[in-house]
Image (cartoon, coloured by chain):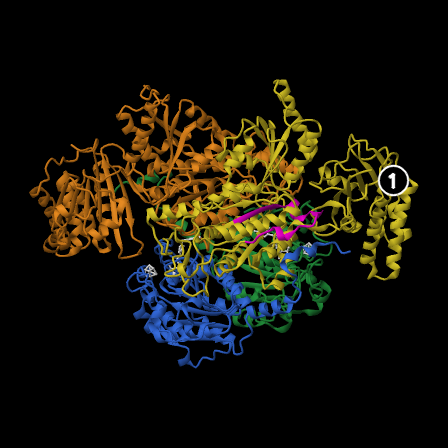
Chain colours: A green, B blue, C yellow, D orange
Amino acid sequence: MTTIEAYQAKDYKSDLKPIWCPGCGDFGVVQAIYRALANVGRPPHEIAFVSGIGCSSRIPGYTTVYGFNSVHGRALPIAQGIKLANPELLVLVAGGDGDGFSIGGGHVAHAIRRNMDLTYIIMDNQIYGLTKGQLSPTSPRGLKTVTSGYGSMEDPVNPLLYVLGYGGRFVAQGSPADMAGLAQMIEEAIRFPGFAFVNVQSPCVTYGQPDQQLKFQKQRMVSLDSLGHDAGDRLKAMEMAQAYGDKIYTGVFYREPTPAPAYEYYVRDRQQVLAGEAVDRSRILDGFAPPA
Amino acid sequence: MTTIEAYQAKDYKSDLKPIWCPGCGDFGVVQAIYRALANVGRPPHEIAFVSGIGCSSRIPGYTTVYGFNSVHGRALPIAQGIKLANPELLVLVAGGDGDGFSIGGGHVAHAIRRNMDLTYIIMDNQIYGLTKGQLSPTSPRGLKTVTSGYGSMEDPVNPLLYVLGYGGRFVAQGSPADMAGLAQMIEEAIRFPGFAFVNVQSPCVTYGQPDQQLKFQKQRMVSLDSLGHDAGDRLKAMEMAQAYGDKIYTGVFYREPTPAPAYEYYVRDRQQVLAGEAVDRSRILDGFAPPA
Amino acid sequence: MLTDLSIGMAGSGGDGIVSAGDSLMTALAIEGYFAMLTKSFGPQIRGGESSFRLRVATTPVRCPGGALDVAVALNWDDFLKFGAELPVTDRTVVLYEAASKVAPDALPLKGVTPRAAVAVPIEQMAREIAGTEKGKNTIVLGLVAGYFGLAQAAILAGLKKRFGKKGEDVLVRNERAFQAGVEYAQAHPIPSLEPMAPPAARTPRLLTDGNDMTGAAAIFAGCTFFGGYPITPSTEIMQYLTREIWKYGGTVLQCEDEIAGIGACVGASFAGKKVMTATSGPGMSLKTEILGLASIAELPLVAVNVQRGGPSTGIPTKSEQSDLFQAAFSAHGDVVRPVLAPTSVADTFGTVVEAFNMAEQYQTPVIVLSDQEIGQRKEAFERIDTSKFQLVDRLRPGDADLEPYIRFRDTETGVSPLSHPGMERGNYLASGIEHNEHGAPTANGAVHARMNEKRLRKLDPLALRRDLFETYGPADAPIALVAWGSLAGVVVEARDMADAEGLAVKVLVPKLLYPVAEEVYREFFASVRAGLVVEQSHQGQLYRVLRMFVDVPRGLKPFARSGSNPFSPDEVLARVREIAGQFRADREPVGQAG
Amino acid sequence: MLTDLSIGMAGSGGDGIVSAGDSLMTALAIEGYFAMLTKSFGPQIRGGESSFRLRVATTPVRCPGGALDVAVALNWDDFLKFGAELPVTDRTVVLYEAASKVAPDALPLKGVTPRAAVAVPIEQMAREIAGTEKGKNTIVLGLVAGYFGLAQAAILAGLKKRFGKKGEDVLVRNERAFQAGVEYAQAHPIPSLEPMAPPAARTPRLLTDGNDMTGAAAIFAGCTFFGGYPITPSTEIMQYLTREIWKYGGTVLQCEDEIAGIGACVGASFAGKKVMTATSGPGMSLKTEILGLASIAELPLVAVNVQRGGPSTGIPTKSEQSDLFQAAFSAHGDVVRPVLAPTSVADTFGTVVEAFNMAEQYQTPVIVLSDQEIGQRKEAFERIDTSKFQLVDRLRPGDADLEPYIRFRDTETGVSPLSHPGMERGNYLASGIEHNEHGAPTANGAVHARMNEKRLRKLDPLALRRDLFETYGPADAPIALVAWGSLAGVVVEARDMADAEGLAVKVLVPKLLYPVAEEVYREFFASVRAGLVVEQSHQGQLYRVLRMFVDVPRGLKPFARSGSNPFSPDEVLARVREIAGQFRADREPVGQAG
Ligand SMILES: Cc1ncc(C[n+]2csc(CCOP(=O)(O)OP(=O)(O)O)c2C)c(N)n1
Ligand SMILES: Cc1ncc(C[n+]2csc(CCOP(=O)(O)OP(=O)(O)O)c2C)c(N)n1
Ligand code: SF4
Ligand code: SF4
Ligand SMILES: [Mg+2]
Ligand SMILES: [Mg+2]
């Protein structure tokens, strides 16, 4: 690990010009990430940032870190491979509500129960942005879109509740409508020594619903702190999470009071314990000598 | 729908001889299903029974209904297609813990939030039986198997809690150690007019842990009824579900007090409303005449 | 008078490029012209550059064509971004925004001197007459209509429809803007510019794109279930069906991913319905496993792949023909499944209907390889007589077949009667595991061999489907071109041009790509000494697939190029000339054929 | 004395068939014999029928062979279930359980009269001597050792290891049971039965199966990350690594599915490690999309497919070679990735090491097509000198490459230096989207064409890898056999037999299946007039793949058959004789070669 120098937000900003629509919430998210990374202070080359596919998933390209804009829904498995390959890296993962909870939905529970030290940021705009406005798993019941012209007939996914049910150890929600809060929350998530999840209400100005847009969000946002929420109580967090889709609670829903060791620490342990049993690689086939 | 005749359990039993290991819990499950089906009384040809791949997934072949032993992890999508194609059918879905919560884990939440009238039975033996004893998503932390020789380093999946978090409307757990209870629970699940989930603690005698075996289970089983559990309270159900992996609670954790209409009812509604707008199929291309 | 005219236009997001193209296209279709409209965009979802090219003719349009006759640049930066998609040559008339301050003799077109260049104060006229810059596209419509005497009444009618709802004032301003464009053209004539000939008949044409056509064809064929997941450039198929299928007692299920999409289709097919899924390359890759399940469980299913640039995420918005290998060979195990490719929007109808028929007839998944070009371009084309198309339903068991029912009975044709849940006495076990005729799982090698043979044998009749191949030109021509999908039109047009030059060239357009109908090719190749398989893929995939089964003439070579690089009839013609030249050099007769 | 002996044995679950086979195999390996052991089971996880066949020889064993020399039936029902897997002919000695009450001249072997049939009271002896029916397998070991004078000391040592822990009493009973078997053989000699010759050298052989060998080779090659999901018949690879890889600083991640398994590999490779995943057909199908990602992101990755019967779930426990099409062509878009196939357990070592080297050298996924036969059979083979193998690591950027770093620089070889997170100044954006040399997303056709060309060009050197092809027999032979994977040994043995009959036949065994090394085949085929491509697939997939790129001799035909049907050298020989006969009929010289 390099010694910590003073990094600034701009050090994490790449030359690639974002092609998001003017006003897209994701602009705010990437800004918050620049800030959080500057505060954490790891040099860009010690950071890996993985995403899937979607408007939101373009985000690694707008940073100076090692980015991986992979395929739709598979950011988490790729990120876990990176982390295990080199546990020293700071690994960020990001994507959209569709990327994370539709096509990628099968990976979330397993990433969480393994509990590697990753930070997973969902830009939840309740719509498919990149493919131009189809129903997303977090779209509300009844929503009319190009794939639900007569209204959606399904209950939406509740990302917060799902993640809490999976045993998520750090679960928060933010919005670019509160940039300072969002940056701080992401910083906290990064510093949390285990899998941390941040759901960001990041509006799609082009295909999103009016009431998701930043100015309306500001009216609906309630900070958990202001409610005196106890972030150490999972069941309480689940109760608060039930309001998803209705109220926008921001802040930390749950933070494991005494974080358990992350997966990679067990791995290292095992490697250290077993290192002594290694033979020289050139003699690996000796293991196939019949027991004389 | 055919008029209900008096069917007996044996009418649902096929000629195919099960190739499960002697003593496998799945024998009990299929018996319970025969009984439940007989009580429900639908003729076998009006029933479709879909599974994935695994020892447990062989189950449709041992019944006389229309069976589909599909591919690993995909029973739920296939079952949903069947149900939408013909909502009159009684559709059962079954499989193992790996089939349902590992490779198929991405489909569960979506099946539940769509809420079709399906019954989903997991034979949860906390191991991969068919492939000979690897770690399953419900295997306890620390378990040593052929793929975790030094012990599992992951928290197990909690099927009950996951399903409740997904908004499951009927959630129960049973065991072949209590055949009568299991059969009744499955019958109730079938009769429930929406997506119903039954987790069965079905021991693997060949690769399973000693404490999962039927005689030990009997000691660990506690019926929710005996605890005066209120099956109408989702949060309470979630609390009870937390004991998964520790205690074995049997019975109904949650049953939606006033079941909402299932997905296929909305579909039918939409079809009826829009039927009037149909043109004759032979004139379907008229829709492409330019607006004169 | 002109009988064929290509117009291209580019500008930025707010310029209304797309609606100009659409308005013109609609007007032309109403007037009875044949036309083709392709649009192209920058990477931005909103606010980036956009363009269209529109080709109009008095006879059916086969392809977007080559160089433009008219190029309209609302903004040079944006125009130039489209490069080869908007080719300007010395036969092109360039109309451009005067505010760009570029002199007509100093256009930023490297080494090209267009036939004429007219700087039109489009923006100024729009502001002054329409009262808003948004009127620019209406001005351009007027210019085009004015210079070529094109579809004025229909364009005006279109303006009325479009702006009528926005109030009398808006409508009037736009009508005036249009008129101003027309008048500008008349006031600034371009020497020797010919007007467009009137359409052959004033019957309105059908107007749609390949994706909507796919949806409509599915409904016509009797499809009542669609399961899928959005992906560019196929999503409009699902969107069309989401609007329409309910009317016919059907359902669209937008699934959580492509695997679930095709899984639901397999389920609905098992339950007795005609089903379809649609996707593009990445989605096809995900569907691989369940396509194999449909093959072994012998369930009918249509899977449409609207091809885009690959590999991986590749280039989602551009056309390519590089998924043929995958369509034919992605499955593990010994699987053969038919692959069909439409050659145009109009042809998509018959191809998709055929796909359903084949799927039902042979109880197999059938892959339709469309491409972004066909899927998203609009064509104005002759009405289709749907009564010509027969529909096939799967063979269902009769009474005799049900005592007892043997699901996978190895009949002479290899096709076994297929029951479905709800049918009394038809109960059976479907499975992805190898099974015997009764459906019982087996690991027996002899049974496995027999079932593999049955599953392949049932497709044998496809080898006789000459109707799925189009040929053009003299049967004894020594030079041949082979092309499929959206390139078929390009190549057929190139052949016509070669023909006009006295070169004897023939074309084969396979719509059934796989299994390879060996006899059809053998017959076609009998006269052939040299030629090209023209494909929009880096590897020339069809050329390779043909070699697997057919001894292709030694002189037949791939002419293949990666996607997002358009092909034009001219360049194909140029290659044909080269080949013919080589023949002459070798003293071989070329122009022999009749 | 015999130098080559095939033994087969079958019984039911509790009979200890498998442990008898394993004990014998281990004893033979210790004594210095070469041997091959294949096991086969019924569909039950527990309690079903089971069998093994074991071939022992004084020289390396190439394949399981044909008819058995000795067949042991503990139970006729079970024995017969294995059909073609335990072929009995007139040269077979049959030892069987006397309790079956079958007369030696009325064995249930349709139309076959074995060389000798001995009813042995195995069960009774076991009960009386070992005190338990479980001793049956020890009795059989004694019989085999007694009849053929085979490895008695080593078998006894093995018994000591196996039963020593269970107490003196158990051990002694088993030793006595073994002795009783030996004595029974001596007391009931079979006329003209020869004993087995001693091994050429008393050096212990290595002993393992293809799956464990794959794991060991991966560790040798420097693999430190494995991501995967269990699936028969590949799971033992993951199981081996789960035991071993930690010792070398590596990790195994058992993922939630195959997609996550290969996804994690792509991540770990991006992070700079050598990585591997392993699976079988259905898992390969699921990995398709991410294999494409690895191709376009140019990340090294080894994916092992231990082939089983397909399509779909197919026949999980039986061998087949029907995933070649998939290995070569499953990706959407224009992708070429190397496909390698090992020909034996021993050869698996070099093949897997080569796969890692290729992956690293060319920054590409490499597919290793093993098969159930190789993956799960045990071989006793000569020690491998690992110092012969060189290891390749990916080209990492040097200082000069880092100012500035251009990840996808189009170098002359097409290979660009590859950095990884943690490396200063090496930061870049990896993506599945088409990108320019810098890694920035693009939809530009020219860039796309160039990058496709780069990604394919970098594999050109593979065409020169003659070392990845084995040839046998006279270079000018007019008859040729081509075979790959587990069939290579069968075919090479058939060639030797043909040679012994004076037929000039040569064999080509490609270990690099794709891309097709055209020159190698052209040279090989130069002398060839007729022959066979021998494959365990219904379609003869290699034959078809070769045709895509090579003009194969007209007389070269596929000899292909679905999996779960073993091939024997005899039947290949029979086909060769036919071909040679045809030649003679045509008056062509056959035996010309030297
Ligand atoms: C395998 C695959 N399926 C589908 C797609 C098409 N696709 C790209 S992004 C996307 C969804 C985008 O929605 P979301 O993840 O919410 O991100 P957003 O654009 O809203 O930020 C889809 C369906 C794809 N690229 N790959
Ligand atoms: C795509 C795919 N991956 C893996 C497998 C191998 N496989 C078959 S069943 C199974 C798991 C079985 O475990 P579970 O679902 O818990 O069922 P059980 O046998 O324990 O009843 C696996 C990994 C497969 N058949 N297909
Ligand atoms: S479409 Fe929506 S999510 Fe995508 S860039 Fe535009 S505003 Fe953002
Ligand atoms: S292996 Fe386990 S789950 Fe499978 S049949 Fe045997 S006991 Fe049942
Ligand atoms: Mg979204
Ligand atoms: Mg299990």
Q: Is residue A165 shown above or below B152?
A: below
Quadrant in which the C terminus of chain B appears? bottom right
Q: Is residue C279 magenta?
A: no
Q: Which residue is mark 1?
A: C119
Q: Nearer the viewer, residue C314 or A29?
A: C314
Chain of the residue displaying label 1: C
Q: Is residue C378 magenta?
A: yes
Relative image position of residue C474 (x, y in whole percent): 62, 31
**Image side of residue C142 versus residue D570, left or right:** right
Q: Nearer the viewer, residue D168 or C409?
A: C409
Which residues are the magenta region? C366-391
Is residue A30 visible in the rendered structure shown here? yes
- The quarter of the picture showing ligand 6: bottom left
For the residue marked with disc 1, what is the amino acid? Ala
Q: Is residue A131 shown above or below A167?
A: above
Is residue A255 visible in the rendered structure shown here? no
Image quadrant assignment for residue A153: bottom right
